[in-house]
Image: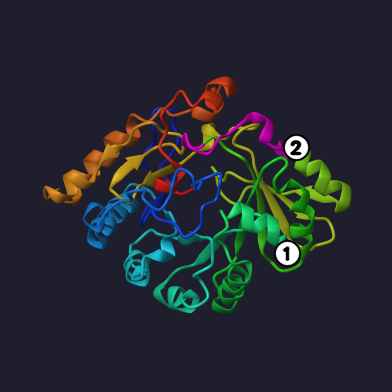
Amino acid sequence: MIRDALQRPLHDLRISLLDQCNFRCPYCMPEDEYHADFEFLRRSERLHYDEILQVARVAAGLGVSKMRLTGGEPLLDKHITELVAGLATIPGVEDLALTTNAMLLAPVAQKLADAGLHRVTISLDSLDADVFRHMSGGRGDLAKVLDGLRAAEEAGLDPIKINVVVQRGVNDHTVLDLLEHFRGTGHIVRLIEFMDVGNRNGWRLDQVVPSRQLLEAVQARWPLRRMDQNYPGEVAHRYAYADGQGEIGFISSVTEPFCGDCSRARLSADGMLYTCLFANRGTDLRESLRNGADDEELREILSQIWLQRADRYSELRRPETAEAHVLRKVERYRIGG
């Protein structure tokens, strides 16, 4: 297993299939920035499946055992099951997952499972219809999202994780109702602090609800007990309901950074490899791939990128700098969450 300059292993690869999305969540792709005239990547600029599979195969040889397909919205790729089938055959891949807003999931959930997908993570910020509409940029259909979730259940794409980005004054008042809805279902809700990913989401520190505050609110209603990590580098602090009705997680990048255990690399749809969610630059793999790099050459490129990695953005974050968007970070829609 390869380790970076801070002795963190390469364990997890996030693969963005495309930069387009059918939602306009304000914390990721606000409508005023990503309007009808915005130019997304052309198909020729995105990696082909054989190129993605080559990167994935080489990454697995370096120790990656977890792969997650992201976007944009990955289900906008109409042939995604073909890629899933290819990734599922790579030796060493123990966990193959997909992050989606689930609005397009219902018709394809069983096909994805049959192709070899193990599980899904669903972005669902509120079950309040008005709040959900606002947080999807007016484009989401809550009924279709819940249909997609049920289809994932029936297809066995579990454990299903439900990601909730919590913003003060936006959806924080709906969190307990959402938790109540999913208690006892086997689904794992993860409450995520609003993060300063990219430069276009208007991030402000006063909109962050600290995980410890959310934990106190949840514990006041349902007693919890702390759980161990599933694996080294897991980002969520896990808690179980004391009454046995499942578990929830807290992801606290702002108030409790987890850079010290981060084992994730991110491949954008146009072939840039990023070693941090908050990176301001990446390495172009597409050029090497299209110039004919074989597996051994690609292995050397990936190895050198990871060996030199020393990212610690969240540990070094200064709120005043983040709010001013001084650093030109990669946008979230390009590399997923």
Q: Which label's residue is closer to the chain start, 1 or 2? A: 1
What quarter of the picture does the N terminus occupy?
top left
Which residue shows up at 62% across the image and 46% down it? Answer: 236
Secondary element at image label 2: helix
Q: x, y percentage for residue 178?
A: 74, 59
Residue 126 visible in the current orientation: no
Give the prevailing secondary structure in the magenta stretch: loop
Magenta span:
197-212
| Residue 215 against residue 245 in the figure, above or below | above
Whole-angstrom CA distance, mark 1 to mark 2, is: 21 Å
Using the image as rendered, state which of residue 292 and residue 242 is in the foreground.
Answer: 292
The disc labelled 2 sits on which kind of residue? Answer: Arg
Q: Residue furthest left?
A: 291
Q: Residue at x 34, y 36 (%)?
A: 306
Q: Residue at x 63, y 58 (%)?
A: 133
Crowding around mark 1 (Cα neighbors within 10 Å: few <14, some 14 to 19, many 20+) is some
Q: Is residue 297 left or right of residue 186?
A: left
- Residue 24 pos. (x, y %): 51, 52
Residue 183's x, y, as percent? Answer: 76, 63
Does the magenta portion include 185? no
Residue hosting label 2: 212
Instruction: Please say whether residue 308 is visible from this viewpoint.
Output: yes
Q: Is residue 116 left or right of residue 163?
A: left
Image marks 1 and 2: residues in contact by CB distance under 8 Å: no
Q: Which numbered marker is on residue 182?
A: 1
Q: Examine the image and state in which quarter residue 48 appears.
A: bottom left
User: For this rendering, which residue is in front, 258 or 226?
Assistant: 258
Label 1 residue SS: helix
Q: Residue most toward the right?
A: 220
- Residue 328 percent coordinates (x, y): 41, 29
Residue type (three-letter) at the residue carrying disc 1: Phe
